[in-house]
Image: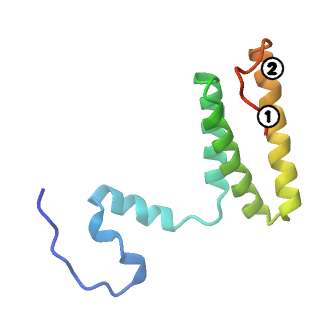
Amino acid sequence: MARRAKREIRDPKEFYVDALSRADRVRLSKARELEGIDEEIALLRMKLRQLLEEHPDKVDLLFKGVNLLQRAVVSRYKLSPKAGDDLYQSIVGVLNGIGRELWPEGANGVEEA
């Protein structure tokens, strides 16, 4: 793979551009036009649901996804740390409830958060 010629970086927004393909440069340009993180929150929710449907046994990934979602929502709505923790505990409670429905015999040693 040929290396691209290095050029002087004048705009800090262009720092990574030389490392991107033409298609990724277009995507980056479009991504810069977005404001807020509502799309990312929606995408996280969609991916969590997809993970739960396709791989309900991957509890560790579900909790990582919930943690990311909780942090994004806290950031978006500027919640206090306590409100963010309450949100996390509520989401974990929902996942634990789903787990109990899916595996009434127990979650094979997985502890609740």
Q: Write the residue at 85% across / 42% down.
A: 90
Viewer-closest of 101 and 26:
101
Please identify the residue farthest to the left as the structure is shown: 2
In the rendered view of the protein, which quadrant contains the N terminus?
A: bottom left
Q: 10 Å neighbourhood of mark 1: few (<14), some, or many (≥20)?
A: few
Residue with the mark numbered 1: 112
Q: 10 Å neighbourhood of mark 2: few (<14), some, or many (≥20)?
A: few
In the rendered view of the protein, which quadrant contains the C terminus?
A: top right
Q: Quadrant of residue 75?
A: bottom right
Q: Write the residue at 31% across / 84% down.
A: 9
Dots 2, 1 in contact, CB < 8 A:
no
Nearest to N terminus: mark 2 or mark 1: 2
Q: Position of residue 21 (x, y in %)?
A: 27, 59
Count all numbered tags in the image, as a single digit. Answer: 2
Residue with the mark numbered 2: 100
Q: Amino acid at mark 2?
A: Arg
Viewer-closest of 3 and 59:
59
Q: Secondary structure at mark 1?
A: loop
Q: CA distance from mark 2 to mark 1?
A: 11 Å
Q: Position of residue 61 (x, y in %)?
A: 60, 37
Give the numbered dot on residue 26: none
Q: Amino acid at mark 1?
A: Glu
Q: On screen, 110 above or below 90?
A: above
Q: Write the residue at 67% across / 55% down.
A: 38
Q: For this view, does 19 lie left or right of residue 102? A: left
Q: Write the residue at 56% across / 64% down.
A: 34
Q: Position of residue 24 (x, y in %)?
A: 35, 58
Q: On screen, 72 above or below 59?
A: below
Q: Position of residue 108 (x, y in %)?
A: 70, 20
Q: On screen, 75 above or below 7?
A: above
Q: Secondary structure at mark 2?
A: helix
